[in-house]
Image: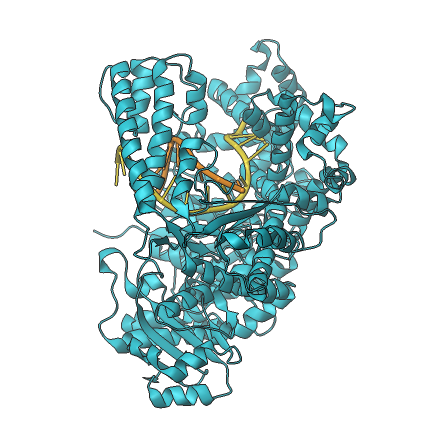
Chain colours: A cyan, B orange, C yellow
Amino acid sequence: MTQNKKLLLIDGNSVSFRAFFAMHNVLDKFVNGDGIHTNALYAFNNMLDLILKDEKPTHTLVAFDAGKTTFRTEMFKEYKGTRAKTPPELMEQLPLIQDLLNYRGIKTYQLPNYEADDIIGTMSRKAEKDGMDVTIITGDRDLTQLTTDKVTVRVNVKGVTETESYTPKHVKEKLGITPQQIIDMKGLMGDNSDHYPGVEKVGEKTAIKLINQYGSMEDIYEHVDEMKKSKLKEHLIDDKDQAFLSKKLATINCDSPVELNLSDLEYRGDNQEMLIQFYQKMNFQSFLERMDIKTEDSSKDLVKIEVKELNDSAIKEIVESQKVHTLVVEGFGENYHTAPIIGILISDGQTYYGTTDVSVLENQSLKTWLADKTKEKYLFDNKQTIALLHRYGCQLAGVSFDMLLVAYLLDTNDNKQDIGLVAHNYNISLPTQEEFYGKGVKKAVPEDEKVLLNFLAQEAQVIDTLKDQMLAELKDNDQDSLYDEIELPLSIVLAEMEIKGITVEASKLQEMENTFAKKLNEIEQKIYQEAGKEFNINSPKQLGVVLFEDLKLPVIKKTKTGYSTSVDVLEKLKDKSPVVQMVLDYRQISKIQSTYVVGLQKFIQPDNKIHTIYLQTLTQTGRLSSIEPNLQNIPIRIDEGKQIRKAFVPQHKDWEIFSADYSQVELRVLAHISGDEHMQEAFNEDYDIHAHTAMRIFGLNSTDEVTPNMRRQAKATNFGIVYGISDYGLSQNIGISRKQAAAFIESYFEQYPGVKKYMDDIVKYARENGYVETIMHRRRYLPDIHSKNFNMRNFAQRTAMNTPIQGSAADIIKVAMINMQKMLVKEKLQANLLLQVHDEMIFEAPATEIATLEKLVPSVMDSAVKLDVPLKVETAHGKTWYEAK
DNA sequence: GCCGTCACG
DNA sequence: ACGTACGTGACGGCA
């Protein structure tokens, strides 16, 4: 059997565009020796590799637009009129992309007066006539009009490495029309980004309905007089000329004067020699290495570094050296509080000393060197390294460069906690932890210790190589003090908190486990009785059948997989059947039982403590997160759950738990960064902020007139504002109509015009800069702010509003934590900072220190940063965490 | 491994 | 016309 010939057609402009924005956040990391950006080039080539491997084409062509004026602009001079112009950083890459394609043996082509689409359409028809299969790659959904049984269109989704494949069948499923009818649809609805109009008030849904009813646009207009009187009919008649023009504009010209034969498009494959030179010029390390892999054994992929034994004489050399050293302490296991150290490597950038013998950590001069803050060190993940070394009796100080922290600050998406992944973002190839150790059952330490040490040496080398570049980027972003003064010192504070751990009384949890088990059993039996059968209440699927089929309760909401049985749904069904309340009770207790009562016991260590791990480099906003277990979501809102907190106790008797939290810190931050006078006044005068808001938005004269319900609604509105408000979201939350919610919001913005201005300005800032910032210059990139997709774009806008608020609040408590630790030392207090829960800190302390803490802790917290409004701190204490609230 | 659900700020 | 509050982690069920 002979393989059918296959033509691969790529829409050069649209894919380049997508490639550029897919890697827009790393724009500054991708610059070649000539100072030209290479991010789009890199992403384009990545995509090529994947597609060529996947499609194995015999013929290839990448089509480009020739210029701004085409036969379409002659028909309609505003065609693509509002399109933003191509960023210069992409413009400079377009010739490079053509060069790359040339070296990769792929033909490129452009045709004056025509767009890339038309070239693609024309060649795909030619190829089809010749009996070839055709695959088209594009970022533009409009090209799906070209799909036939022989022609598949793959549209880029999420960047350029993934695509959605359109066949006629898929078009039908997705839109409910045939590929030929897409142009009718576009004609009727118009196109915002290409800037041509359709019929007034007709969007995708209406267009598809009309097409399904009548057929083509011509058919629709043939029958337009028969339609019954409606606005739609009027619009159709009024905009008829426009609709036909738009259809013409949307139609890809499959008969363009392309002077190419199929034989010109034969795929020749890489010109190895030229390609290597080109990659070198572009600093494309990983592509170069990928080429080598093809010819050599993949185990030789690793660059061999000579690693010398970390023995006594090596240690002597290290401790006497004045050089900065890179330190790798490798743990093996899921949780570094229990994982063993499997290797240690120290390098001065020239010599690499390593060992798998952990007894080296008993060497006194090495211990002293590690703990010496004047001996400067670089590493990846300071907190983990401190925790690992601590279990082996070693202290660590003097760390000036933590590559993990810097990578996260530069781009919060680099949060995978893996040096290999960070290296990859800088175009250096280093195996990830998973690639090196394997995953699942195959996960293991290499038998040959040389292999392991070589890996550690590579890690050290990567840290060393990237340090200067990354620190320079930090400085460019004005983030050096965020790193030096906040994140790096905080990593030490967090390490101390994790190592200290919080004492938990297992007996208390055990007792609760028995009580809840009995209760669960009782409710379970009652539910079975009411339902008339036994089933798994924890299965939303089975529960759905019982509620909505057996008991025939009304379906309020559906999920992707079936009926929704979430709380808000069940709350609405409470009156309809007694079983609903029982299910709610069951759910509540079952959650407490599985996640907390039983769940937490698994984490209690032999020292009677739980040692959580704070992820310092995960969230998109700068908050911490807590895992294994999560100690930031211990129940408090309902009393049954809150009982859990009785198990959290101080480590010594006659000690207490002490907690301190910021009051309304996010709203205070909003008052500060928005500069809104009315909101600032409320905080400066220490009014009840929610009551004050209620008074304003309900137009009352005094807060005395505010009813509890008004206050509740105002509070929800304040929250909504912080989240990046939508009328729908607010209406759902407080159970009012969308219209009412919209009126609340309007009134809110009238009363707090500064807040309104902030919301508008921050979205504009995000659009112009591609990111938003906190008060300490923490950055979050928002590429979706430019998305064509309504939802993605709106989501990005809400995050633009929320992130500076949530993130600045995170900055503030981080500063407070660092100052807190200093204060505790300075005042020689025995108190320990144990936990952080976003806006509060939890301590244990001798009862005799409580009075001191009540004075000092709030003063450290409210002076952490200077805002235009005061920060307010509230404290509590008691025998257990339950009582300290 | 993903989904629905629910705990926290 | 679109389908929404922001940020997290862990559990049980189910493919």
Q: Nearer the viewer, residue A790 or A448?
A: A448
Q: How many marks?
A: 0
> Residue A546 appears at what percent x and percent y?
29, 19
State whether residue A791 is above or below residue A203: below
Residue A276 sits in quarter: bottom left
State whether residue A13 is above or below residue A426: above
> Residue A13 appears at what percent x and percent y?
55, 52
* Residue at image location 43% in from the left, 72% down from the top: A395
Residue A724 sits in quarter: top right
Q: Is residue A69 visible?
A: no
State whether residue B2 is above or below residue A744: below
Q: Nearer the viewer, residue A512 or A20?
A: A512
Q: Is residue A275 visible?
A: yes
State whether residue A37 is above or below residue A613: below
* Residue at image location 20% in from the left, 51% down from the top: A1
A495 horizontally vs A334: left or right:
right
Q: Nearer the viewer, residue A169 or A559?
A: A559
> Residue A658 appears at what percent x and percent y?
52, 49
A755 horizontally vs A8: left or right:
right
A309 horizontally vs C6: left or right:
left
> Residue A97 appears at what percent x and percent y?
52, 62
Q: Nearer the viewer, residue A688 or A283?
A: A688
